[in-house]
Image: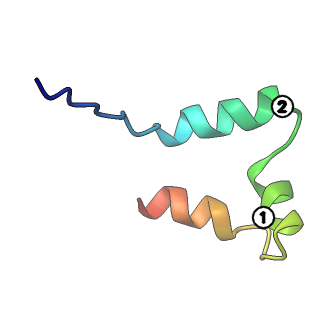
Amino acid sequence: MTMTHTQKDWHPAEIICALRKRGTTLAAVSREAGLSSSTLANTLSRA
């Protein structure tokens, strides 16, 4: 018997909410990664 595991993608609003719960923002995470502050926000809006 084979079990199939499917993982649900997160909605962009869920990602932003999870970051805010941790006390950070997309812009802050982008800057910490050495990226422009808008890079991660752009990826969510184009996904």
Residue 18 vs residue 8, the one in the foreground: 8
What whole-number distance in Å separates the C-alpha atoms at marks 1 and 2?
Answer: 15 Å
Horizontal and vertical percent position of residue 22: 83, 31
Q: Residues within 10 Å of mark 2 (few under 14, many from 20)?
A: few
- Quadrant of the image containing the C terminus: bottom left
Horizontal and vertical percent position of residue 45: 49, 58
Q: Are marks 1 and 2 in contact (CB under 8 Å)?
A: no
Q: Is residue 15 above or below residue 27?
A: above
Horizontal and vertical percent position of residue 7: 36, 34
Q: Residues within 10 Å of mark 1 (few under 14, many from 20)?
A: some
Secondary structure beneath label 2: loop
Picture disc at residue 22: 2
Residue at 86% over, 56% down: 28
Residue at 65% over, 63% down: 40
Q: As drawn, which residue projects farthest toward the left?
A: 1
The way the protein has been coloured in the rendering is rainbow
